[in-house]
Image (cartoon, rainbow, N blue to C red):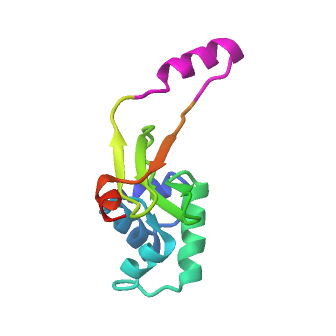
Amino acid sequence: MDKNVLKSSDLKNTKRRMAILEVLENSSIPLTAEEIYSHVIKTVHLSLSTAYRTLGTLSEKGILLKNLCQDGKTYYQINSHQHKHQLVCTLCNQTVPIDDCPLSIIEKNLIKQTGFTITGHSLEFSGICPKCAKHN
């Protein structure tokens, strides 16, 4: 993770912040605060409440994306500033990216109808992946 991302958001570059960003950068899936904490605590001393506060700050500054899922848990991931679409298994939380943007036509129509400058969108489908469906 580039240290300048914190500086450009008017945040100090701390070991805790960098450790959290590194964990998320190395993860192929969004993680909960508890999952992030369990990885970070191995290398940097922090409390779970500090992890939550740091995740909140990084989310508010737009460095992380925060998503409350149907399982009631909040998941965090690096904000790559690219919109993404995905399928999420409600049992194992496996995430499968959708390469096409099924909302591009709707977005263009909304711009015409409302005059809004749309800066982004997200789309998430939830369901049960084949592996979990086989076990149920």
- List the single residue furthest toward the top: 112
Q: Is residue 45 left or right of residue 43?
A: right
Instruction: Name the one closer to the observer, 87 or 110.
Output: 87
Q: Tell me which corner region of the image, top left, top right, bottom left or bottom right, holds residue 111.
A: top right
What range is drawn magenta here?
101-118
Instruction: Name the one closer to the observer, 3 or 77.
Output: 77
Q: Residue at x 32, y 65 (%)?
A: 135
Q: Position of residue 77 (x, y in %)?
A: 44, 57
Q: Residue at x 57, y 73 (%)?
A: 52
Instruction: Name the one closer to the observer, 106 or 55.
Output: 106
Q: What is the magenta segment's predominant secondary structure? A: helix
Position of the N terminus, as image quadrant, is bottom left
Q: Where 6 sits versus 113, above or below?
A: below
Q: Tell me which corner region of the image, top left, top right, bottom left or bottom right, holds residue 2.
A: bottom left
Instruction: Name the one closer to the observer, 19 or 8.
Output: 19
**Can you see residue 10?**
no
Q: Is residue 16 left or right of residue 116?
A: left
**Residue 113 drawn in magenta:** yes
**Can you see residue 67?**
yes
Q: Position of residue 130 (x, y in %)?
A: 30, 53
- List the single residue furthest toward the right: 114
Q: Is residue 93 left or right of residue 130?
A: right
Q: How many marks?
A: 0
**Residue 84 drawn in magenta:** no
Q: Where 124 sits versus 5, above or below?
A: above
Position of the C terminus, as image quadrant, is bottom left
Q: Residue at x 71, y 17 (%)?
A: 114
Q: Position of residue 12 (x, y in %)?
A: 51, 66
